[in-house]
Image (spheres, rainbow, N blue to C red):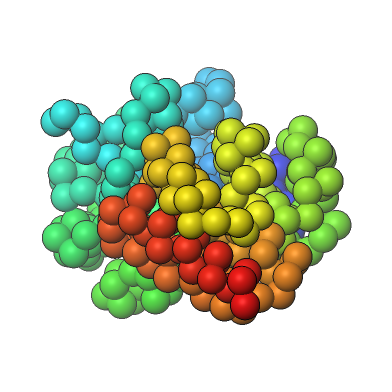
Amino acid sequence: MFNFFAPLVGQPQAVELLTQAVTQKRLAPAYLFVGPDGVGRSLAARCFIELLFSQTRQHSLHSRLSQGNHPDLLWVQPTYQHQGQRLTAAEVKEKGLKRTSGAIIRLEQIRQVTEFLSRPPMEASRNVVVLEAAQTMAEPAANALLKTLEEPGQATLILIAPSLESILPTLVSRTHRIPFYRLDEPSLTQVLTQTGHREILQHPVVLSIAAGSPGSAIACYEQLIAIPEQLLSDVTKPPSSHRQALELAKRIAQELDNEQQLWLVDYLQHTYWQKWHQSGAIQQLEQARKALLCYAQPRLVWECTLLGQLAIGNR
């Protein structure tokens, strides 16, 4: 039998549970793929869908699923709102837009799910819907999805989330949980090598932030090389004066979008801890993260943070 899960590394329990569900013909109406970001949940969903759809003879199945153009598959991602349009993170990046708020799964998208499931499958034995980052659903969207989960029809839904606590208990109770875990060092090395990202292994801070998540390691490294080199060099050293702290805060707010600034908080926390083991500096950065997540004025957040770092350095 062809191993559809061959690309998935380090998740034997998930592979076993999903394979048995198909071979024993005991498919659940809905699954919850739960675990840290970047450990293979979305890849597992694609492998699982290939296995499901392989039960019916179809032309160029792998290619069509990879391109997202299979008529019986609907893949839902969180979106940003821009000038009346809903854009995914990839589309926002492609257009060079600055992200000032987080992406969410919107009520309109759940209505599209309901409409998609209202028709019978065209080629496969069932329709499949995948909801990435299901934790980003606002309550109206989650409640609308709940009605769909109660009567999914001839379909399988896959929700992807970081934890059980991140989504409504009523959604958890109507899904079959598939757990995913952080990878050990050999598995992490294998994935980064196979995907052409072996250079990441030379960056201990990136690996520390990733904490066993290949996807997080790749995303972190991409953020690292996207930050202006001089800015990164300046900010990884405590400011030497009030003026330098204020100027640096201004540069961060002007040159980096909200997501990049949140990444920078993580990077600085790990860097500061590895260099100086200063708990006070780490706590200040954690306060900065909370403020940025609440969409406080970024320049003010960084001014307070960097002036605080200056005060700690002068003690």
Q: Is residue 30 visible?
A: no
Decide which of 114, 307 is in the foreground and name it.
307
Does residue 192 sit above or below 294 in this rendering? above
> In screen coordinates, is 104 left or right of 11?
left
Relative placement, left or right, of 178 versus 75 is right
The N terminus lies in quadrant = top right
Specify the quadrant of the image occupied by residue 270.
Answer: bottom right
User: Going 22% across and 43% down the picture, which residue do you hit?
Assistant: 109
Q: Name the spot of residue 102 as percent of width and height, x first.
A: 32, 50
In the picture, measured across the screen, residue 76 lies left or right of residue 219, that is left
Q: How many marks?
A: 0
Residue 91 versus residue 69: which sits nearer the camera?
91
| Image coords of residue 48 (percent x, y) | 55, 48
- The image position of residue 269, as x and y in percent, is 60, 64
Q: Residue at x 40, y 63 (%)?
A: 304
Judging depth in this view, the residue of 276 and 105 nearest the camera is 276
Identify whether 264 is placed above or below 146: above
Q: Is residue 203 visible?
A: yes
Position above or below: 60 against 224: above
Residue in the image at 34% along x and 39% along y: 99
Q: Nearer the viewer, residue 100 or 283?
A: 283
> How far from the left and from the top, in percent, is residue 273?
69, 69
Residue for point 77% across, 33% down = 196
Q: Quadrant of the C terminus?
A: bottom right
